[in-house]
Amino acid sequence: MNPPLTYDELASLIKNLVGITVEPSELAHPNATFDAFGVDSLGLLGIAGELQNRYGTPIAQGAEMSRTPREFLDAVNESVKAGA
């Protein structure tokens, strides 16, 4: 079973794949949105693709349209859980 994706890992993926440095604590803020950090749907699509390769299971269609980090984490973690 794969461990759930965390804010720390998401921050690292955003930095490595999108080129934007974001603190995990900022992503975890209840009012955080990807727009506020400058992360768009194309960036999230790249992250979802990387996670799909990592976990070997499809990531929920539409995850790249998540407005918040929490929505994205939920979509990814549910996809990984369902594919386990």
Image (cartoon, helix red, strand yellow):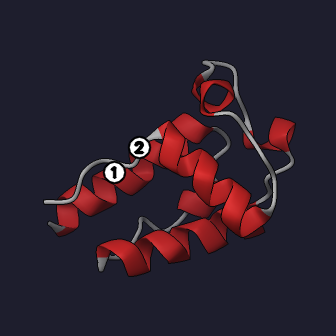
Q: Position of residue 29 (x, y in %)?
A: 63, 20
Disc tally is 2
* Quarter of the rendering containing residue 56: bottom left
Q: Secondary structure at mark 2?
A: helix
Residue 67 position (above or below residue 58): above
Q: Nearer the viewer, residue 84 or 22?
A: 22
Mark 1 touching mark 2, by CB under 8 A? yes
Q: Position of residue 68 (x, y in %)?
A: 64, 38
Kind of residue indicated by mark 1? Asn
Left or right, 56 with respect to 46, comes to left
Quadrant in the picture for the N terminus: bottom left
Residue 23 position (above or below residue 11): above
* Residue 74 numbered tag: 2
Q: Nearer the viewer, residue 24 or 70?
A: 24
* Quarter of the rendering containing residue 24: top right
Q: Residue at x 41, y 43 (%)?
A: 74
Distance from label 1 to label 2 (Cα)? Answer: 5 Å
* Residue 77 numbered tag: 1
Q: Residue at x 62, y 46 (%)?
A: 11
Mark 1: few/some/many CA within 10 Å (<14, 14-19, 20+)? some
Residue 31 position (above or below residue 47): above
